[in-house]
């Protein structure tokens, strides 16, 4: 397993932008599929986005497609989530997750081996 530390959350007005970062410890970052999930108060945690080991493939939940962009810098062992055109319904605790190698079920929590502690994103109307 690896350790993940998220940052970049905060309070932003609707229509604004934030960029989340997730730094991963360990030597083998390049073999990990990375994902972002979120959990709003009173709701279950849900898939937001995922990126393949090389960054060549990205996947998004329909609710964020066209507004959010996931990327990774393997040299820095960091994955990013650029969030634009934020809406109040994007308010949640955002988690970074890592899975060794690839899985077709990249959208499912159970396939991920390691999780960060989360960073809070609050979007005001």
Image (cartoon, helix red, strand yellow):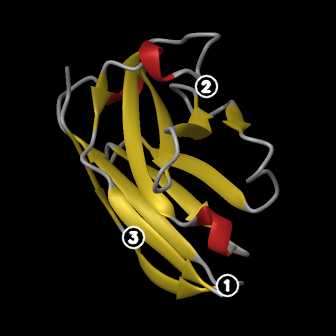
| Coordinates of residue 51 in the picture (x, y in percent) | 58, 34
**Secondary structure beneath label 3:** loop
- Left of 67 or right of it: where is 116? left
The image quarter in which residue 110 lies: top left
- Left of 113 or right of it: where is 5? left
**Secondary structure beneath label 2:** loop
Q: In the rendered view, would you say 9 is above or below 115?
A: below
The residue depicted at 71 percent of the width and 40 percent of the height is 60
| Coordinates of residue 2 in the picture (x, y in percent) | 20, 28
Res 117 label: none
Q: Which residue is mark 1?
A: 14
Q: Which residue is mark 2?
A: 107
How packed mark 1 is, by other alpha carbons closer than 10 Å (few <14, some 14-19, many 20 or more), is some
Res 9 label: 3
The residue depicted at 46 percent of the width and 32 percent of the height is 34
| Coordinates of residue 73 in the picture (x, y in percent) | 44, 47
């Amino acid at each position: 397993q690896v350790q993940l530390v998220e940052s970049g959350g905060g309070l932003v007005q609707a229509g604004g932008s934030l960029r989340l970062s997730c730094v991963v410890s360990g030597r083998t970052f390049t073999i990990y599929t990375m994902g972002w999930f979120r959990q709003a108060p009173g709701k279950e945690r849900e898939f937001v986005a995922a990126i393949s080991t090389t960054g060549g493939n990205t996947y998004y939940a329909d609710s964020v497609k066209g507004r959010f962009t996931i990327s990774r810098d393997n040299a820095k062992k960091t994955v990013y989530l650029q969030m634009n055109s934020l809406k109040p319904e994007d308010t949640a605790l955002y988690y970074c997750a890592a899975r060794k190698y690839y899985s077709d079920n990249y959208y499912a929590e159970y396939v991920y081996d390691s999780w960060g502690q989360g960073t809070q994103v609050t979007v005001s109307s």
